Image (cartoon, helix red, strand yellow):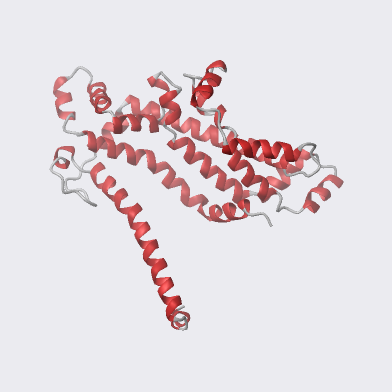
Amino acid sequence: MGNEFYKLTAGEKLFKFINYAIIILLCLSIILPFLNIFALSFNSGKDAERGGISFWPRMWTLENYEQVFTSSNIGKAFAISLFRTVLGTAAGVFLTAMAAYALKSKTLPGVRFFTMMIFFTMLFSGGIIPYYMLLSNLHLTNTIWVYVLPSLYSAWNLIIVRTFFQQIGISLEEAARIDGCSDFGIFMKIIMPLSKPVLATISLFTAVGHWNDWFTGSFFVRSAELRPLSTLLQEMLTKQDAIRQYLMTAAGSNQQELLAKIQLTGDSLKMATIMVVVAPIICVYPFIQKYFAKGAMIGSVKE
């Protein structure tokens, strides 16, 4: 590697230097804010008010996380987020793969029309008011199913998966049909096992979308019992009244306990909640990272 570097021309060396410099700057722009959030989440709220905390806690404490995990609001919100992410991802990926398998067939009547209609939905939408009226008429608003059912389909994911399926040799399907395998059997026993890279890719897209979605909980759900973790975090980040109400709920009627909890400033609670929100995605990503780049590349390019 070192010998190859010396063989490069001056222009190529400069190009590599600029590339590495840009990559390092981009990495720092992502890592440093995260380290600051980490430091504030583990620092005493009272001490954090003094400022000056950058990337390491000055006064270590677990009070912020104790408050987050002992609150009934956080627990319920976490359960809602986990439910919608697991069920929504599993069902969405499976149904998307089934639709992509059907649309990859050139013999399907009207396949070009269906493909164009799906692509059309990526360019235009009906707007938020018609969408709300649709969900309301379907009796999905203010129910837990509003998080799952409307998001079972994604035009972008469908096109990526369909393009990937088209790279799989048709001879495999023909051989399976000769052996008496049905279309569903071919889909489950041949197509799905060969499509792990692209399925892992859209699984990550779908799971992150479900986990980070605060919009649905804010606009289509009135009950605080049904709001996911991301919606609760959004309220904490934008409404100081929500933080005060959060502290009152956690403290109950014990005013002495409330005074002690007020030492946990709004910022410290925000940072601890942010860490709780991002931690699951960070833990899951390394296990599917090896499929991610391959699936995104093969699924988005058709030769």
Image point 56% across, 48% down: which residue?
201
* Horizontal relation, residue 38 to residue 114: left or right: left
Residue visible at 30% across and 33% down? 237
* Residue 186 located left or right of residue 64: right
**From the viewer's perspective, is residue 87 above or below residue 141?**
below
Count the marks.
0
Q: Is residue 154 visible?
A: no
Q: Is residue 73 above or below residue 48?
A: above
Q: Quadrant of the C terminus?
A: bottom right
Q: Residue at x 75, y 39 (%)?
A: 111
Residue 238 picture location, percent across and down: 29, 31
Residue 187 in percent (x, y) is at: 72, 42
Q: Is residue 123 left or right of residue 258?
A: right
Residue 175 at least partly seen: yes
Picture quadrant of residue 156: top right
- 122 relative to 185 in the view: left or right: left
Q: Is residue 172 above or below residue 256?
A: below
From the viewer's side, name the closer residue of 103 and 190.
103
Compare residues 41 and 137 and report the one nearer the observer: 137
Q: Quadrant of residue 298?
A: bottom right
Q: Which is nearer the eye, 92 or 194?
A: 92
